[in-house]
Image (spheres, rainbow, N blue to C red):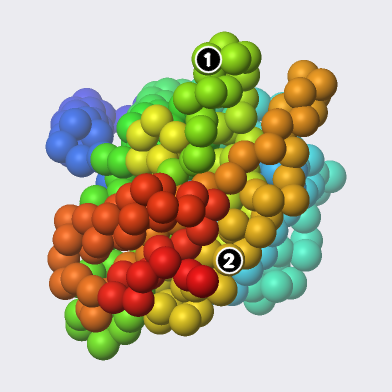
Amino acid sequence: MPEAPGTQLTRQSQELNIFHDVAKALTSSLDLDSILQTIMEKMAEYFRPDTWSLLMVDEQKDELYFAIAVGDAAEALKNVRLKVGEGIAGWVAKHGEQVISNDVENDARFAKRIDEATQWETRSIICVPLRSRLRVLGVIQLVNVDMGQFNEPEVFFLQALCDYAAIAIENARWVEKIQELTITDDCTGLYNARHLYKTLETEVYRSSRFAYEFSVLFIDLDHFKQVNDTHGHLIGSKLLAEIGYLVKAQLRLIDFAFRYGGDEFVVLLPQTGKDQALVVAKRLRDALRVSSFCRDENLNLNVRASIGLATYPHDARDAHEIIRQADEMMYVVKNTTRDNIGIAQRGVMK
């Protein structure tokens, strides 16, 4: 039986309001979670399912996980994962086609283990893929919708909302990539100097608040100019990349490594006093002493470094001053022995 004209107008008006709210969320925020939350809430308001969820594709594991789940079964779904291809949502992720199943009991694609995990009874499912070009980013799933109210206009409306969600996810990923590019150094893959001061200021605040120490190592390669002059800038860049990798390999997961510029590197060691930082500095110095670089180019280059070390709060109490102190100690080494470590308030290692 066709809908009464008044009901149809009311639904069209509701759709327009929802589109307006979703478009507003997309243009006013870069926060993916809040945009997706808005989209999911609007879907629920319109379709009134018992449970609704957004499953995201984990491409590395070839699985789907519940990024957002709302309704009685939501809590139980938090740790549930589906293989791409498993269940109706998994089938949709694999094939990139929507599925509207009125009777899941008689649908061979339905994964009963999800109902077993949630103690929920699924009668009907609507699953729509979130597509970006040739990839499926995720799946929106509505469980136990009143199928008597679900016709072609509703299918079109749901697909439009899913397209909005896909745009939001894709935009957020691009923003993440752009942010990554602006804080990393092309040559070495380490963080760049711009990101150094931002990270240092955060560390000063954190350490001041919790009475932590932290240390900074300022590393300058000895005679690096000779490498560029003898072998050219391409080899120089390759050497910097290999040294960046070596520096990172000597650090803990909580440490930060930056390319400060040219042949200078900075290492930030959170929650690390002077004596512990000296152990790391020696380890870096010794790793450089025993390593040879650009072996793929048959060069076997040996490189040494002058290293300066300063510790917060004993040597400095702000980001710029601690870098200045570490830099100053590096220059003391550079102008005397090279291939050694200068420690603020202690001098050059004997």
The residue nearer to you, when weighing 65 against 152, is 65
The residue nearer to you, when weighing 225 against 37, is 225
Horizontal side of 152 relative to 22 (left or right) equals right
Q: Secondary structure at mark 2?
A: helix
Among the two numbered marks 1 and 2 on one chain, the one whose residue lies closer to the N terminus: 1
Residue identifier under label 2:
282
Residue in the picture at 33% in, 80% down? 213
Q: Is residue 194 above or below residue 151?
A: below
Residue in the picture at 36% in, 70% down? 347
Horizontal side of 148 relative to 39 (left or right) equals right
Q: Is residue 236 above or below residue 276?
A: above
Q: Residue furthest front?
A: 336
Instruction: Examine the image and state in which quarter residue 287 appears.
Output: bottom right
Disc ID at residue 109: none
Q: Mark 2 belongs to which amino acid?
A: Lys
Instruction: Examine the image and state in which quarter residue 182 appears.
Output: top left
Q: Could you tell me residue 82's position as x and y percent?
A: 72, 53
Q: Could you tell me residue 150's position as x and y percent?
A: 46, 37
The residue nearer to you, when weighing 105 against 42, is 42
Disc ID at residue 229: 1
Q: Badge 1 local density, few (<14 within 10 Å), some, or many (20+)?
A: few
Q: Quadrant of the N terminus?
A: top left
Residue in the picture at 52% in, 64% down? 281
From the image, state whether disc 1 or disc 2 is nearer to you. Answer: 1
Residue in the picture at 49% in, 50% down? 338
Q: Mark 1 belongs to which amino acid?
A: Asp
The residue nearer to you, when weighing 14 against 196, is 196
Q: Is residue 296 above or below residue 302?
A: above
Q: Is residue 269 above or below residue 18?
A: below
Q: Secondary structure at mark 1?
A: helix
